[in-house]
Amino acid sequence: MWAQKETTTTRDVVASEIPAGTKFTIPAGARLRITQSLGGSYTVMVPMGYLARIDGRDADAIGEEPGRKPTARATVEKPVEDLCWDQLRTCYDPEIPVNIVDLGLVYSLQLTPLPEGGNKVEVTFTLTAPGCGMGDVLREDIC
């Protein structure tokens, strides 16, 4: 995470307006200020003066490199439930640099073994504000 970092988009990039969650395109050549880079996504201040979230897979568009995921070897010795909680801790509120677990937004995590192998994971969480448009974005981050 940086306090703030100026950058210019190298290509058109899709972003989500914060807190509405509305998708829009930031054109190539736009000057941005990166205000947060946690959990594999970026929160930027756009020229129009509001915040937007750029997914980590589009990091190259703002001159950054996508974050690296843990290797299979690093995760093999952990219980599945711990791995799930680790994943939840990579999901950050786009407006503040705190993950959804530490914010207390995750109420429960339940694993149910599947007959064909693997597990079904159910997560109950809430948003920082009623009607927040970023719910779908956070839901995608959890998966």
Image (cartoon, rainbow, N blue to C red):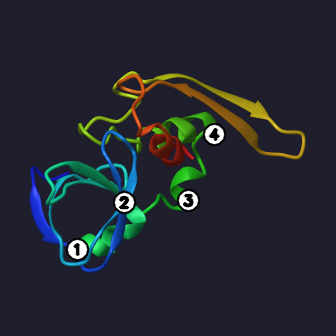
Q: Which mark is residue 73?
A: 3
Question: Is residue 38 placed above or below 138 in the rendered structure?
Answer: below
Q: Which mark is residue 58?
A: none
Q: Quadrant of residue 99?
A: top left
The residue under label 2 is: 24
Residue at horizontal 41 percent and vertical 40 percent from the top: 134
**Nearer mark to the viewer, of 2 and 1:** 2
- Mark closest to the chain's N terminus, 3 or 4: 3
Q: Residues under labels 3 and 4: Cα distance?
A: 14 Å
Amino acid marked by disc 1: Thr
Q: Which mark is residue 9?
A: 1
Q: Residues under labels 2 and 1: Cα distance?
A: 14 Å
Q: Which mark is residue 80?
A: 4
Amino acid marked by disc 2: Phe
On the picture, is 140 further left or further right than 133?
A: right
- Nearest the viewer among 73 and 47 is 47
- Mark closest to the chain's N terminus, 3 or 2: 2
Identify the secondary structure beneath mark 1.
loop
Question: Is residue 51 placed above or below 56 in the rendered structure?
Answer: above
Residue at horizontal 27 percent and vertical 73 percent from the top: 27
- Nearest the viewer among 14 and 63 is 14
Q: Quadrant of residue 24?
A: bottom left
- Mark closest to the chain's N terminus, 1 or 3: 1
Q: Residues under labels 4 and 2: Cα distance?
A: 36 Å
**Residue 67 visible in the picture:** no
> Do labels 4 and 2 touch, CB within 8 Å?
no
**Nearer mark to the viewer, of 1 and 3:** 1
Task: Estimate the x, y position of residue 34 in percent, counting from the top left.
Answer: 17, 57
Q: Residues under labels 1 and 3: Cα distance?
A: 35 Å
Residue at horizontal 46 percent and vertical 60 percent from the top: 69
Amino acid marked by disc 4: Val
- Mark closest to the chain's N terminus, 2 or 1: 1
